[in-house]
Image (cartoon, coloured by chain):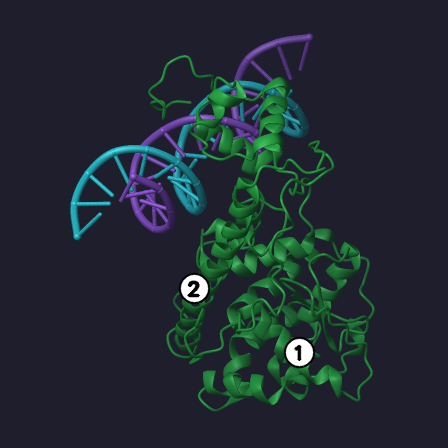
Chain colours: A green, B purple, C cyan
Amino acid sequence: MGRSPCCDKVGLKKGPWTPEEDQKLLAYIEKHGHGSWRALPNKAGLQRCGKSCRLRWTNYLRPDIKRGKFSMQEEQTIIQLHALLGNRWSAIATHLPKRTDNEIKNYWNTHLKKRLAKMGIDPITHKPKSDNLSSADGHSKCAANLNHMAQWESARLEAEARLVRESKLRSSTIPSNTTTTFTPKNQPLLPPPVPMTPAASPCLDVLSAWQGAWAKPAANNSLGRGYTIDLESPTSTLSFSDNMMAPTISGMGIAEDSTREDQQWKCLRKSGFSMLTAAPFVSTEASSWLSESSGGDFAAGFTGMLSDKANEQNSADGCNDSDNAECGSCVDVEESEGEEDENKNYWSSILYLVNSSSPPNSPPPVF
DNA sequence: AAGACGTTCAACCGCAAATGC
DNA sequence: GGCATTTGCGGTTGAACGTCT
């Protein structure tokens, strides 16, 4: 495709794979594992280079791949992780089970990036384009914190990715001469990916930090507002419960009602989501780093970049309840609002979440 | 109906890291 | 430790398909 071939050997087929080739590759890997990719094509009777075979397998034929539309939670996860890690698709993919890095990369380039850009958000910095110059004082601190956390999170993700790779390698190199029968649609040849449970990743991560901040009070909260926490979620993302007042954590694997979620995001924004509002729910530990990050003034520092923009939006919407935790007007979402507005709100909320997730001064990860 | 234009995504490439000898 | 080979990653391409004019 427009470049010199990666394999010098002539006669090797390129371009789209035929069903027959897929079948050959699948049959071979089912029987022998992939072993050496370079040697595989000859052994499997394929006129392809090993690289092409590996790519076909990892991005398309592997049984533990989920195809189809990305859920809203997956989108949120991608955006949050992209804000932290940049174009490190393989690291992002470790947080999205059954999605390949290539698929995530494509989805980002064809959908998410454009949607962010359309909203005036720089898809690289994840900040409003007009906001780039206004981050001189308070925001720079947050940016530094975010950067610190990004490095920290990045190192952890790399370690996780390594574990996943090693696990897969071990299993894939073992010939499956067991009773495993395999077709592209059903039987997994490889074991399920290493779950990113809190137990597996006991250290802080940005998303977990968020979860922790929200989740901890759940055990002894007397509010009874419907906290729901999925501790097994590998990459939980923040969402809000039905009445929008108490934060909830929902797991990635949980099917979501997108319409409802839209409304939740909308209300999150409408309620002027801020740590002022959230403070009563935040654990001591979490509020500690939040406080540090804001130079001692937890509420002011942390909410600065959140509420400013949210208030701006609220004013535009005529919702002035940003400082009111019991914003009742947010419960009923006006149906007359356009879908575009909902999308905007949803994306705005994501941006604010991304901007705010950086516990500073955390110790370096030990793996 | 047909050509132009835009979008999507599988597959390619080169590079860097990891691994083996 | 040094070199050769293999593997993984991220950027890019272009065919296929959809939409617009």
Chain where mark 1 sits? A
Query: What kind of element bears circle 1?
Result: helix
On the image, the x and y values in percent for residue A280 come to 67, 88
The residue identified by callout 1 is A214
Q: Is residue A338 above or below residue A4?
A: below
Q: Residue at x 79, y 56 (%)?
A: A257
Instruction: Measure how far apart labels 1 and 2 are at the Cα level.
Output: 24 Å
Task: Tell me, yes or no, if residue A126 can be seen here.
Answer: no
Q: Residues within 10 Å of mark 1 (few under 14, many from 20)?
A: many
Q: Can you tell which of label 1 and label 2 is closer to the viewer?
A: 2
On the image, the x and y values in percent for residue A67 come to 67, 40
Q: Residues within 10 Å of mark 2 (few under 14, many from 20)?
A: some
Q: Nearer the viewer, residue A298 or A364?
A: A364
User: What's the residue type where badge 1 is placed?
Assistant: Trp
Query: What kind of element bears circle 2?
Result: helix
Is tag 1's residue or tag 2's residue first in the polypeptide sequence? 2
The residue identified by callout 2 is A155
Task: Tell me, yes or no, if residue A290 can be seen here.
Answer: yes
Chain where mark 2 sits? A
Q: Is residue B7 above or below residue A345?
A: above
On the image, the x and y values in percent for residue A352 come to 56, 68
